Each structure stands twice: as C-alpha cells, then as structure tokens.
Amino acid sequence: MAVKPNRIVTATALRLSILWSCLFAAVGIHLPYFTVWLASQGLSNELIAQAVAVPMLLRILTTPAIAAIADRHGIARTLAFAASAACLSYAALSFAPGPALVFAGAVGVGLAQGVMPSLADALTLTEIRRLQDARLRTLDYGRIRVFASLSVLFTMLGSGALVTLLPGGKIIWLLVAISIFPAAAAIWNARQSRPARLNPRDPGTLTASREKLRLALVCIAAAALVQASHAEVYTFGTLHWRSLGLSPGFIGVAWASGVACESVLFVAVGRLSGGERGAAVLLILGASGAAIRWTAMSFDPPWGLLLALQGMHALSFAATYTGSVILLGSLAGPYHRARMQGWLASAVALTTALATMAAGVLTDSLGQRAYLVMAALAVCGLAFAIVTVALKRRLDGAVGHPQSAGAGGWTIEPS
C-alpha cells in the first residue's frame, strides 16, 4: 500500500528534527562542564587546554576523510557510527584509570562530536533535495536546524540543576546517559533513510563546473573567517565577565540570549533568504553583524548593551552558518554532498584553532581591544561574502535562473 506524499514529508521532517535535537543535547552539558570533569580527574590546566584544542586540529584532516567515506557508504550510516563512537567514548572515560587515558578518551569524544554537525547538514540537505526531486512539498532547512539550538538552550538552562545532582567526577555519567539519545536517533535515521540512486552519467566531481567550484571556495573562505572571529568571546568572554563582577546567573542569561536569538533566525530564515537564492546574502548579513558586534565589544559595553550584542549571535553565527550550508549544499555534486560540508567544517576548524591560539596572546597584550582583531577578521570575511554574492548572481545570470537544489539525479524510493 503506497504511503501518502504528505505523510512522507511529515515523517521526514519529524525524523530530522528529532535527530538534530538529540545530536546537540549533550552540548549543553559538555560545553560548560566537561572541563570541570577533566579537572576532577587530575588533568592540569595545560592538559585540559590540549584536550580541547587537539581534536579541533585533528578535525582539519579527519572531517574531509570521514565525509568522503560518508559519500561512498551512506551519510546516515556514517553519522550513526560517529554518534555511537561518541557515546562509547564517554562510557570508556568513566572507567579510564589515569590522566593519559582520560586525555585520549577526551580526544576521541572531540573527534566524534566534531564530525556530526557536518554529516547532519549533508543528510538534511539530501533529504530536502529528494523531496524536491519527487515533486513533494519541500522542507525548510532552518526550521529543522532550529531544534539543535533549542536543545542546547534547554540543556544549558537545566545543566546547573543536573550537575548539582551529579557533581565533580559524576558528571561523566550524565554525559554517558545523554549521549545515548543522539546515538539512538542516528541509528533510527540510518534505518529509515531511503536509499539514494545516483545518475551514472554524473561526472562525480565536487561541483558540476569550475564556476561553481570557485563560488564554493569563496563561500567557504567567507564563512571560515567570520566563524573564526568568535574565538575571543568563546575563549575569554565568561572569564572577563566574571572579572567584572557579573553574576553567574547573568552570564548564563547572556549566553542563553545568543542561543535564543539564533533560534529565531533559524525559524525565519526561509522567508528571509528565499532559499538558496538569498543564501549568499545571509553571508553578508552575518559578516556585517560580526564586525559590528566585535567592534562594540572592544569598548567593554555595559550589561544592557552586552545582552543586545550577545543577541547578535543570530547574525554573526546563525546567518553565516545557514547561508554557507545552504549555498554549498546547492553547489555540491551528488557524489560529494557530505564532502562539501566536510570541507566547510574543516576550514572553520582551522581558522578557529588559529584564532583561538592568537586570542590568548592578543588578550594578554590588548585586553578587550583584542575584539578589534576579531572585527578585522569579520571584515575580511565580509569582503569574501561580497564576492560570493557577485559570483552567485553571475552564475545565475549565465544559466538564466538560480540553480535548483534538487539537481543531481536523486530519486526517492517508496516506502
């Protein structure tokens, strides 16, 4: 018995939304408290910093390689493997007998977690394209991706109470428990995802033309520079605000306001951007917002303005992220969907790692004025974003209409 088309669309949307919410559930606990657990296991500050930085550097090489495997053997299956590896790494950490093994396990967690967002992006865009190719009602990427932000927001807000119940060395058990959900959701998606059939006449290149490849590279450069400009606030924002005497409660609200505003943008992005046609414009909005945000942050703003600037995370992060993911998804060849997102993730990891290392030196020498260097990075990203828009319009003009997100010869299998 054939399944009604609308039911296919609804089931796909539900499955992807649950996947995104589960994938990021652990982030709300991991981000603020994993280093606390590492310290409870006897790791020095230097080792803790290395445990955070080493996976970021390794992802520069591993993410494209894992994405290539995903394109060949299945994006959903590879994502399920990565989510399961993260869960098992947390579980292994709970039994690690010494700092050396704890360090190794922390690196394993970081590597597994780091590749999951790009694979989830590739899977989501693939499902959206499949629905379009089947002439079914399409899905809004932003309205699916928002569940990741909401998941982080709610777990961050509840993390204090949860960690009170499982303090210090027991935090790892909380992470083990919560990481079961992304593993289960990823396995479920791998079992439910329809098999994709590729057009054998497709050349199997990263993009269908040199013009598209040039556009993709410029887009990646723009996004990587703007995302790297967040290094100062990610690394030293909370430490500086604590030195000013701001309460932990206020600092938590400041971070949560950024996540809340990015959630609003993800919901509205479909109407704001007009789909892939306006994705390049989102890059300009994101880069401009980042330049303004970091310039204002360099003057040590009062708490009211600080909250507003944190709300601009919707532009500096979310607009940049969404614009780059959607645009690159429309440019990728059908054999390279995961790889295109992998190259973006790798470039962001490289620029962010370099900016994070520079932030330590800059903060020691310039204090809050280090944000001006971050603003300069955003301006460089803005320049690449402007070129991206120009190249996109030239490409659309050459073919007479915007490129279809559904190109590439995918078909949808009936249930």
Image (tube, helix red, strand yellow):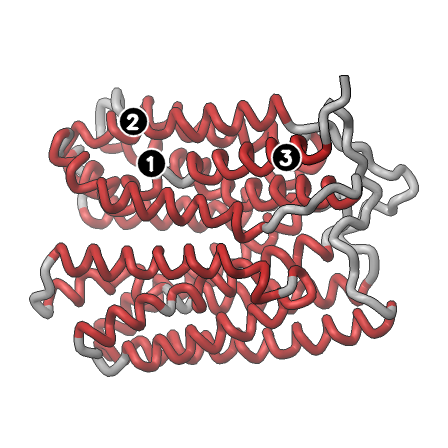
Q: Which residue type carries mark 3? A: Ile
Residue at x-position 36% and y-position 50%: 53
| Mark 1 element type | helix
Q: Residue furthest right?
A: 201
Q: Quadrant of residue 211?
A: bottom right
Q: Nearer the viewer, residue 392 or 354?
A: 392
Badge 2 marks a residue whose secondary structure is helix
Q: Which mark is residue 201?
A: none
Ranked by sequence position, the earlier of labels 2 and 3 is: 3
- Which residue lies under the disc numbered 2? 93
Crowding at mark 1 (Cα within 10 Å: few <14, some 14-19, many 20+)? many
Against 373, is 161 above or below? above
**Mark 2 burial class by Cα count in 10 Å: few <14, some 14-19, many 20+:** many
Q: Compared to 304, does 274 lie above or below?
A: above
Q: Nearer the viewer, residue 396 or 18?
A: 18
Spot occupied by residue 140 in the image (x, y as percentages of width and height): 60, 50
Q: Do residues under tags 1 and 2 come within 8 Å of each other at their CB atoms? A: yes
Residue of label 3: 75
